[in-house]
Structure formats: C-alpha cells, structure tokens
Image: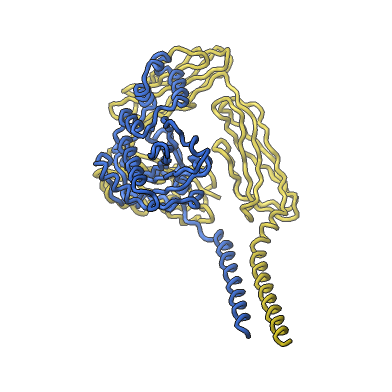
C-alpha cells in the first residue's frame, strides 16, 4: 500500500470518527438525565454566599482594585465574536472603566439623588428631557405634585422629586469579590446592544430580570455614535450584597457602559438585576428600586 | 504506462475511500435526521379560539378540538401556555390516526380593557422542533378598572403600610362610591381627574398582622356589578428562600424520589432550633436541616407519583424564630 493510500485511509477514518462523535453527542444530549434547574440555582447561590465582600463605602482605590481583578470576559453569545481583550485597551481607557464602574456602585450605595446626579454630571450626562417628560405626566396623573411645581424646578430638584416619587432605594451594601466579570466588545449595530443581550445565562437560570430606567443622557448619545461607527461596549457583571433590609441577599447586576470617543470616557447605558431568588412571583414588589 | 496505471488505481482507491466515508457519514446522519422527517409527516388539525368580548376578570371554560390527520400515532407533550391566564389539567396526549380530542381550558380575562392575544402550544413528544399553535383572541371591556388590580401590603414595625390605587373610567362613567368591607382599611379619595381617580389605601395600626379585605367601586352606572379589588396584607419577613417555588418531575425526573434543597437566606444569630419546617402535604418530607452562618439548607424528599400534574400546591412552611414564616409552593410536571 502506498504512503498516499495510507494517508487517505487515516484521513477517511478520522472523518468518520469525527462525524460519529459529533452526531452521537448531539443524539445523546437530549436523552441525558436533566440536572434540575433548582439544583443549579442553589449551587450558584451557595457559591456567592461563601465569598468575601468589599463594602461599597470603602475607598475608590479599594473598589477599583476589586473591579480590576474581575476576570476579562469571556464574552458570550453575540458578543463573543467581537470581544476585545482588556490588555488591548490603553491604560487610560481601562482605568476610566474601573472608575466609571466603581463610581456607579458607590453612588447607588449612598442612595441619595444628589450622589447619583453628581456622578452623572461627572460623566457628562444630563436628564433626558423626553424620558423626564413622560415621568412628569405620570407624576401629575397620580397627583403626587402639580404640573406648575414640576415646571418651576431645575434638573437637580426634578431628579430629587422623581427619586422620591419612585421610592428609590437601591439597598446596595457590598460587592462580592471574585464573582464579577468584564466583557469589552465592539458594537457594530444598535440591536446588538439591546438590553436583552445582558446577563442571559443567569436570567435563564433564575427566570427573572429587572431593567432599570436610565434617566440621563450625554450630549452625543450611544445611538448617535453607533449609527456611524463601531463603538466599544463594556458589559460588567457584579454580584451585589444588599443591606439588612433585604436580608443581605446577594444578586447579580449587569451594567453596560459604552466608550464615548468625543469625551474619552465610559458612559453608563443599561442596568439590569437578576434577582437570585428564582421565579418572578411577587418580584415587582420586592426588587430594589433604582434610578440611574 | 505502469506509472499511469498505478496512479489511476490509487486515485480510484482514494475516491472509493472517500465515498465510503461519505456513506458512513450519511448513514449516521440519516439515523438522526430520519426522526424529524418522519414526524414532519404528521399533521394535527387545530382551530383557533375566538373568545369575543369579555368583562375584565371574567373566567370562561373553553374547548377546542384537535384532530390527528396523519397516518401515524401522534404523541404530544402537555400543552404549553403563553400566560398564567390559561389553566388546563391536560397532561401528555396520544392521538391515533384520525382520532380527535377535546382540549378544555379555563381562561381568566385580564383586569383592564385590552385586546387579547394568547397562545396555546402543542409540541410533539417525538421531535421538539414540531409544534402547533392555537391562537386565543378576543377583547376585554369595563366601565371602571383599577391599577394595580389587587393590592398586597407589607406591614413593618411602626410603619403602617399604604399604597395608591388608580381608578380608570370609560368616558361618561363616574366613580360614585369607594368602600371597603373591613374597618382596618382606610381609604382616602383624591379629587377626581378626567378619566381617573386616585385612592390612597392605608392599613390602620390596630390591624391583625395578616389579613385580607375587598374594596368595592360603584360607578354612576348603578345597575352594573361593582368593581372589586382584593387587598391582602402580611407581616414583613426578613429572611428569603431560594427557590421560592419548586418544579418537580421535569424531563423524566424520577417521580418517587425527588431530592431538592431550599435555602433560607438572611439569618442572623439563628441556630437550628430557631428554624421550623412544616410539610403541608404528606408527599413531601424534610430529611435534614443544616445551618451555617447566615444560611440554612433544608433538604427535601418528594414523592409525586400520585400527585396530579401542573397544579400548584403549598407544600412547605418555613418559620424562623422571631422573623415570621414563608410558604413554599410546588408544581408537578407531567
């Protein structure tokens, strides 16, 4: 038998074996015993409960260090093909990302409208007039205050009123170490950055999600930039320990930032909670209320 | 000449080998693919359900016919619904060729006027890619409706709970009276607006820790039934459970020995003796309770062999000393 024939036989056998392996995996996957979702849920919660947590009222350096230790990705789903490893980012872009994340965590922990408003100002964001107008209508409809009072307010006062009306209280206390992740990716179309693409795996496991309203916007919005060019986006997952009023419950939050080339800074875009309770029963009345 | 013939032989040999490999691949692939092709030949006749006009909160029992129009027996999973407003007791269905079956379900109309578009999905047990959809359409109407449609208040120490109800009315309809059947509920009606009115509902300090009441809303159309809004209240419990509800017997899980763990989170200074686990049904047993730091692990063993599928049961009450109780529900899958 010539050498060529031998190579061909090996190649053919390898081809058959590979196909058999792939198809049998596919075929037997459906008949494999199912691991109950509740077991996975319990195991995940136990893992989060066993880890140390850094209080959110500690120094920004401390927090930035915890965030800097988050593993780089891996990006999943649609983001995986356009992932950008953290080491490829410049020091300045990376440092600003950690400060942007840490700042948001701290202002949510402070739980005052002033803290959130100031954070947004430092990120170059102002109240979005369109969203504010919708909220004003709802506030007037509920007779919480009169239209004339709302119209006479400046942005800071208006935000404080919306904060109270919304009964905003994030109840954040600490960030659980060793649980977060950062996935930086290049977004080439708006639908890729849909909020539904955030935190899919845990949403599937715990069967709930709460998307929070981002009431602010920078001068040049994500939508404006994304129409004309690819935009750097960072999906950050943090497991937050809540305060005593929420029984120190630890749940994952997903924060999406985008990098504004005009401001050379990361801008907050979306915030999502997947409550680690399993199921959505009574969730509307129990999830922390956040405005950002 | 010899070199040409040996080259041809090698080429023919390699082609034959490749052909054999392709055949083997096709045979393996065919073994898997033939299943879906066979199922695709099955044909189930389904009919959409038109509910017409319903009053908000109406409950209708509806039947729809399904017919197996194929030449083979059709195995269907228990029907899947697009919302909790459809309840049906049906488990898996097997239909012989040309056999038909009545699918009966209970539909609860939404609590505000809107177009109804819901789905009932029947999936082949033999191939998850094959499914049939029954569309359920209609609309709800009302002279007056409330947002939220029911209230659930949580009483904390020193903080009597309160919440706002927004009453919406159809043009030309006015709210005449809002009253409660319980003296512990205080109602304060704010000035009516064009098409809505705000009612502030609060609980008096002498209310029992747990209870329920009904608020009735009478409109200017006196002959119509008043709108009823259920209000429940319960004490605030600090601890939380994971999961809040159990799903048992899914994906062929053994029905007589299902093991589950429920975590109690948010414990502070509570030992094992401070935790009470009371099964509320006889088919669930607490095997072990382990307490560590702020967590308790309650290990359960469930036997759902005789339990009807798809219903939700209250199965376990978990109490923590000085911090109230929570009830865990479970649903059994077919």
* Picture layout, residue B97 above or below residue B145: below
**Residue at 68%, 33% in the rendered image:** B50
The chain whose colour is yellow is B
Residue B141, percent from left and from top:
60, 23
* Picture layout, residue B329 above or below residue B124: above
Residue B104, percent from left and from top:
64, 40
Q: Quadrant of residue A220?
A: top left
Q: Nearer the viewer, residue B51 or A184?
A: A184
**Residue at 52%, 38% in the rendered image:** A227
The chain whose colour is blue is A
Q: Is residue B144 visible?
A: yes
* Quadrant of the rendering where the N terminus of chain B is positioned: bottom right
Residue B200, percent from left and from top:
41, 19
* Picture layout, residue A264 above or below residue B78: above
Q: Nearer the viewer, residue B244 or A5?
A: A5
**Residue at 71%, 48% in the rendered image:** B44
**Residue at 55%, 64% in the rendered image:** A25
């Amino acid at each position: 038998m010539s050498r060529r024939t031998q190579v061909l036989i090996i190649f053919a056998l390898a081809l058959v074996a590979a196909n058999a392996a792939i198809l049998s995996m596919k075929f037997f996957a459906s008949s494999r015993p199912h691991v109950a979702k509740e077991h996975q849920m319990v195991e995940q919660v136990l893992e989060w409960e066993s880890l140390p947590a850094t209080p959110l009222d500690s120094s920004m350096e401390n927090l930035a260090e915890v965030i800097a230790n988050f593993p780089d990705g891996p990006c999943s789903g649609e983001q995986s093909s356009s992932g950008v490893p953290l080491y490829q980012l410049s020091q300045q872009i990376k440092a600003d990302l950690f400060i942007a994340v840490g700042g948001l965590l701290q202002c949510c922990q402070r739980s005052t409208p002033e803290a959130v408003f100031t954070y947004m100002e430092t990120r170059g964001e102002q109240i979005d007039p369109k969203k504010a107008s919708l909220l004003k209508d709802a506030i007037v409809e509920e007779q919480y205050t009169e239209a004339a009072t709302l119209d006479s307010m400046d942005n800071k006062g208006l935000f404080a009123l919306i904060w109270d009306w919304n009964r905003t209280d994030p109840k954040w206390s600490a960030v659980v170490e060793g649980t977060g992740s950062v996935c930086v990716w290049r977004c080439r179309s708006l639908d890729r950055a849909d909020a539904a693409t955030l935190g899919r795996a845990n949403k599937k496991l715990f069967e709930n999600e709460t998307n929070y309203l981002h009431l602010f916007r920078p001068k040049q919005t994500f939508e404006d930039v994304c129409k004309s060019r690819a935009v750097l986006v960072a999906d950050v997952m943090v497991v937050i320990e809540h305060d005593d009023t929420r029984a120190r419950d630890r749940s994952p939050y997903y924060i999406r930032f985008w990098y504004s080339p005009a401001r050379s800074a990361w801008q907050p875009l979306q915030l999502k909670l997947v409550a680690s309770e399993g199921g959505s029963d009574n969730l509307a009345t129990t999830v922390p209320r956040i405005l950002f | 000449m010899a070199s040409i013939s040996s080259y041809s032989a090698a080429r023919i040999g390699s082609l034959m080998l490749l052909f054999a490999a392709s055949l083997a691949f096709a045979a393996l692939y065919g073994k898997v693919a033939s299943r879906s092709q066979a199922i695709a030949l099955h044909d189930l006749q389904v009919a959409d359900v038109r509910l017409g006009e319903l009053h908000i909160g109406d409950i209708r029992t509806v039947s729809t016919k399904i017919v197996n129009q194929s030449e083979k027996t059709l195995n269907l999973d228990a029907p899947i619904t697009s919302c909790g407003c459809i309840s049906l007791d049906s488990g898996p269905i097997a239909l012989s060729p040309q056999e038909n079956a009545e699918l009966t379900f209970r539909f609860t109309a939404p609590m505000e006027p809107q177009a109804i578009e819901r789905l009932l999905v029947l999936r082949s047990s033999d191939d998850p890619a094959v499914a049939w959809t029954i569309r359920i359409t209609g609309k709800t109407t009302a002279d007056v409706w409330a947002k939220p449609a029911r209230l659930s208040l949580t009483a904390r120490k020193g903080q009597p709970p309160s919440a706002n109800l927004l009453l919406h009315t159809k043009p030309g309809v006015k709210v005449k009276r809002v009253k409660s059947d319980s003296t512990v509920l205080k109602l304060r009606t704010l000035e009516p607006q064009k098409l809505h009115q705000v009612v502030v509902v609060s609980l008096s300090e002498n209310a029992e820790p747990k209870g329920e009441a009904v608020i009735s809303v009478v409109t200017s159309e006196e002959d119509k039934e008043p709108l009823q809004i259920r209000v429940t209240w319960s004490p605030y419990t600090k601890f939380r459970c994971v999961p809040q509800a159990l799903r048992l017997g899914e994906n062929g899980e053994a029905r007589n020995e299902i093991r589950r763990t429920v975590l109690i989170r948010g414990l502070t200074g509570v030992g094992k003796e401070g935790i009470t686990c009371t099964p509320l049904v006889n088919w669930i047993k607490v095997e072990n309770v382990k307490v560590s730091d702020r967590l308790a692990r309650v290990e359960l063993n469930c036997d759902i062999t005789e339990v009807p599928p798809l219903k939700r049961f209250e199965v376990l009450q978990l109490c923590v000393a000085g911090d109230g109780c929570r009830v865990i529900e479970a649903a059994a899958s077919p």
